[in-house]
Amino acid sequence: MSQLTSAVAAVVTDAAGRVLLCQQSQGHRFWGLPGGKIRSTESPIQAVIRDVREETGMEPEIVDLVGIYQLTGDGCGENLPDVLMHVFRATASAAEATVNSPGRICALAWHDPAALPQPTTATTRIAIADVVAGRSGVLRDVQRDREPEIPEATDGPFEPARPAHNGALVAAGPG
């Protein structure tokens, strides 16, 4: 391990037990948990609250720490840093989720934990399984998945979010 990045994510659930997922705007458009890197001046809890707010417009209520996941491997490219991911369990605020970071996220959607969209990141799948099983405080090593057999997204300007036919919020864009 030559580099290590510290990050956070939240498994945000609603009253129906669905989980909120964000789809990345670039690359292979993986679906993942809201979150991001921890800044040098903040704790993991401060970072996850900030990132969920920035990405979704929601105020998460943190319940507990699901676990710490060390993401390693070169499945999606060489020289990627290892990531030490603090994943928290959270509930949704009364506000609806909106795409607030269209440069990073092109869609937000609530999903049944048993029917996750593809491609979904390895850490997302494992953390959601831990939440469904009622686990807290787990420590896990996670290997990155291989690149999916889908083309990479094209980068381009995005417009404000609009509802999609399936209830997901998507950033309008070219095409």
Image (tube, rainbow, N blue to C red):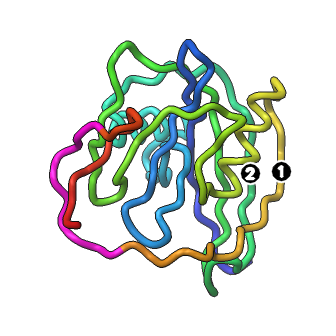
Give the total of numbered labels. Answer: 2
Q: Looking at the magenta stretch, what is its main secondary structure?
A: loop
The residue drawn where x is 36% and y is 53% is 105
Residue 35 left/right relative to 155 = right
Q: Is residue 124 left or right of residue 27?
A: right
Looking at the rendering, which quadrant does residue 93 occupy?
Answer: top left
Q: Circle 1 sits on which residue?
A: 140
Left or right, residue 143 beside residue 61? right
Question: Is 81 placed above or below 161 here?
Answer: below
Look at the image and give the residue range highlighted in magenta: 154-163
Q: Are marks 2 and 1 in contact (CB under 8 Å)?
A: yes
Expressed as whole percent of the image width and height from the top left, the position of residue 110 reads: 50, 32
Location of residue 146 with respect to 101 vertically, above or below: below
Q: Residue furthest toward the front? A: 165
User: Where is residue 139 shown, x and y percent of the image?
Assistant: 83, 45
Q: Residue at x 49, y 45 (%)?
A: 35
Image x and y of residue 57, in percent: 31, 31
| Residue farthest along the bottom direction in this orientation | 78
Please, is residue 110 above or below residue 47 in the view? above
**On the rendered image, what quadrant is the C terminus found in?**
bottom left
What is the quadrant of the N terminus in the image? bottom right
Residue on which disc 2 sits = 69
Q: How far across and how far down the image is residue 107, in percent?
A: 37, 47
User: Which element is circle 2 on?
Assistant: strand
* Residue at mark 2 to residue at mark 1: CA–CA distance: 5 Å
